[in-house]
Image: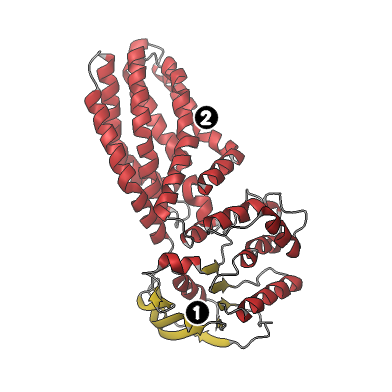
Amino acid sequence: MAILKRDLALAYRQRAELMQPMLFFILVISLFPLAVGPEPKTLQLIGPGVIWVAAILSSLLGLERLFRDDFQDGSLEQLMLSSTSLPAAALVKVLVHWLTSILPLIILSPLLALFLHLSEPMYWALLKTLLLGTPLLSLIGAIAVGLTVGLNRGGVLLALLLLPVFIPLLIFATSAVESASMQLQYTAQLAIIGAMFLFSLALAPFAIAYALRVSQT
Amino acid sequence: MAVLSVTNLSVVKRDRLLFENLNFAVKQGGLLYVKGQNGAGKTSMLRVLAGLVAADSGEVYFSQQNIQDCRENYHQNLVYFGHKLGINQTLSAVENLQFWCKQHLVSISVDTIYDTLAQLNLVGLEDIPVANLSAGQQRRVALARFWFKRDAKLWILDEPFTALDTQGIDLLSNQITQFLSGGGAVVMTSHQALRIDYPTDELTLEYRI
């Protein structure tokens, strides 16, 4: 609990840094209508994919913050030497990351859906996949951050490690929105994303804790 | 009774053997002063002792129990002070210490934190972000931990005197002596000559190639 309070306070003080992924998200998405042309049909076709790819990329931008400062200033060492359980602490940090850098993107998404001419059923499907799928980005991302935090400049490496892992998520999420655009059921895709989310929620904290311990050597 | 004992400890770092088959024990009220050149492996040894890193071979015991098996109990009785201060630059001194105390289950009032910071000559600097303090002042903030966790059984200090002025060194030396006479055990490294008036055991690590 103390960690939650501290990290939220820290995020508030570093809000300028947190704005960057958000602006990146908006800019990338607004580039597409300009580049592809304002044809509603084309935009509708590529829209869900564009929003998801932009969400993944901008979540990668802020991901490094997750453990970087704590590793560099030694707070992580002190955390490991305290009675707090490391997996629980890692889970709290992931939660703060999701609340501060991904939730704002989801809140912005209706505006961007408008940019891309998404229909209403498509938007609702997109929102559901984002809500279920983005925590996965934080959870899996945190494992990779834990592993690379000991290397300085792990930024690009992080992207190379993580992007292939996110492919299944991307496929199911965009296929759900596509089904919605044709007025079809998309519960199956949502269920699979939900299963992936729950699976990583159960196991990722331990993997993150292990990765952080390895990084201490 | 030995608070900390080490048997056949060897540590390898990047294919270089830092030391091997090290055996020693630190008793209650004992001060172990680890000496050695730069790169001799002092910091690596202290990190192994603290349980941050696993040794390549050998065991570390805390009150006769392997530290791997009694991690929680061990860490509750340990204060580790490393090269990295463990102080967040954006938070203020008081916020940092409050958080540390909560994390380490030390219940302490805010007034005590202010009093301790005053003892450490940080009056008026308690509520500004730590990034605005000088290196020595930041160190003092981190050192305040030794005023809060006096019921610990073991302190591990890695170069605690770096960047401190003479008055700061005296303050800390006094605190260490008090802790030792209260039955605590201390393991520390330092490149300065120790100004602690207390019987000291020395351990010298040789630099190996």
Q: Residue at x 54, y 45 (%)?
A: A7
- Residue B175's place in the image compared with A75, above or below, is below
Q: Chain of mark 2?
A: A
Q: Disc 1 sits on a residue from what chain?
A: B
Q: Secondary structure at mark 2?
A: helix
The quadrant holding residue B20 is bottom left
- Camera sees residue B102: yes
Residue B40 badge: 1
Q: Position of residue B97 (x, y in %)?
A: 62, 56
Residue B11 seen: no
Residue type indicated by callout 2: Leu
Quarter of the C terminus of chain B within the rendering: bottom left
Mark 1 burial class by Cα count in 10 Å: few <14, some 14-19, many 20+: some
The correct choice, above or below, for B117 with respect to A94 in the image is below
Label 2 Cα crowd, 10 Å radius (few <14 / some 14-19 / many 20+): few
Residue A51: quarter of image: top left
Q: Which mark is residue A23?
A: 2
Name above or below for residue A29 compared with residue B199.
above
